[in-house]
Amino acid sequence: MTQAELVTAQFERQRPQLRGVAYRMLGSLSEADDAVQEAWLRLNRSDTEAVENLGGWLTTVVARVSLDMLRSRRSRREEYVGGPLPDPVIAAEDENDPEHEALLADSVGLALQVVLDQLSPPERLAFVLHDMFGVSFDEIGPIVDRTPAAARKLASRARNRVRGAAPVPDPDLGRQREVVNAFLAAARAGDFEGLLAVLDPDVVLRADAGAGQPELSGLVTGARGVAQRALIFSRVAADARPVLVNGAVGMVRMENGRLVNVAAFTVTNGKIVEIDIVADARRLRDFDARGLGA
C-alpha cells in the first residue's frame, strides 16, 4: 500500500467521527459534510508523514473549519442556516449504521443541538471537543486563541448554560414509544384531555415549516397551547411512521417516497417535554429516505 493509499484509508476510518464533530459544531448535515471535505483537501495539501496522531490532527482541522463557519454565520447576522432548528438525524428504529452511531453518540438529541446553537462559537467548540470527544484543553486553547486555562473556562461556562437547558430523555426507548404513541392516538382521535395527559405542563413545541408556511412555524409553550396545535396536525399524526430522530423516538410523514415532515419528541419522566418539527420542504428534499419505508 502506498503512502497516499494509507493516508486515504486512515481518513476514511476517521470520517464518521469527523462528521460527528462537525455536526455538533454546526447543527447542519450539509455544512458538516463541507467541513469534512475541507479537512480532506487540507490533508492532501499537507505533509503528514511527521504527524504522530492523524486522527487528532484531522479533528483539530475540522474543529477550526467549523469554528470559522460559525463565526462567518454570526458575522453575517444570519438566523440558523435553513431555519431555527438543527438538521435532524433520522434512522429507522432497527438501523445499525456506524455513521449514524457516530453522529448520535453521547445522546446528542435535537433538544441539546438547539441549546448548543445558543452558545458563542468558542464556547461551543470548547464544550464539544472536551466534553463530547475528550480533547484536552492544551489542544483546544490554540484553536480558539486562548490559553488552556481560558479554554477550560469557556467549556465550564458552556456546561453551565447547557445544564438544565436541554432536557434529558428517558433512557428506555420502549417507554418513550409508549408515551409518543399515546400522544399520536389522542391527536388522531381529537382527544384534548388525552393530549394533556401525556404533555408536561411546560412542554415546548418548536416548528420550522419553511418560508412558504410561516404561520406553521415558531414556538408554542405550555400543555394547552401544544395540545391545540396537535389537534391541527391530526392528519399528520394519522400518516406518521415511527423512526429515531437524533437517537430518540420520533416520527416522519412521507409523500411519494419523500420526507415532508419530521418530528422529534423528548420524553422525560413519562411526559413529553419537547417536540421539534421540521416540515420545510427545501430542507428535507435531499434527505435520504432509504430504510424508512419509502
Image (spheres, helix red, strand yellow):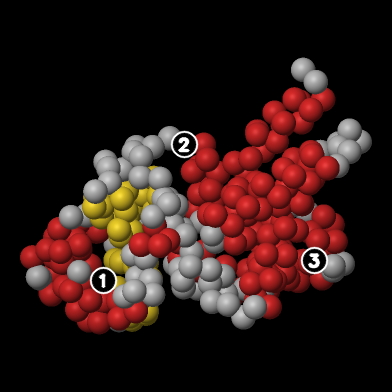
Residue 160 location, quadrant: bottom right
Tell me the residue at 46%/71% (across/down): 83
Q: Residue furthest top?
A: 1
Compared across the picture, whether 219 is left or right of 136 comes to left
Query: Disc 2 marks which amino acid?
Result: Asp
Q: Residue 196, can we see it?
A: no
User: Residue 291 location in percent, x, y?
Assistant: 34, 38
In the depicted structure, whether residue 258 falls above or below residue 26: above
User: Would you name the residue on which mark 1 appears?
Assistant: 199
Secondary element under disc 2, as helix, strand or loop, is loop
Marked residue nearer the N-terminal end (3 or 2): 2
In which quarter of the view is residue 129 placed? bottom right
Please tell me which of labels 1 and 2 falls first in the chain: 2
- 283 to the left or right of 259: right
Residue, disc 3: 144
Mark 1 and mark 3 lie on one chain; the one further toward the N terminus is 3
Q: How dense is the environment of label 3, judged by Cα within 10 Å: few (below 14), some, or many (20 and up)?
A: many
Give the amino acid at mark 3: Val
Q: How many numbered circles does the render carry?
A: 3
For marks 3 and 2, give the CA distance. Answer: 32 Å
Q: Quadrant of the C terminus?
A: top left
Report the mark closest to the observer, 1 or 2: 2
Please name the residue shown 75% across and 58% down the image.
64
- Residue 74 in the image: x percent, y percent? 65, 76
Q: In the image, residue 179 lies at what x, y percent?
A: 24, 59
Label 1 Cα crowd, 10 Å radius (few <14 / some 14-19 / many 20+): many
Q: Quadrant for the N terminus, please.
A: top right
Who's the residue at 30% across and 60% down the image? 261
- Which residue does the numbered mark 2 point to in the structure image? 97
| Residue 238, visible in the rendered structure | yes
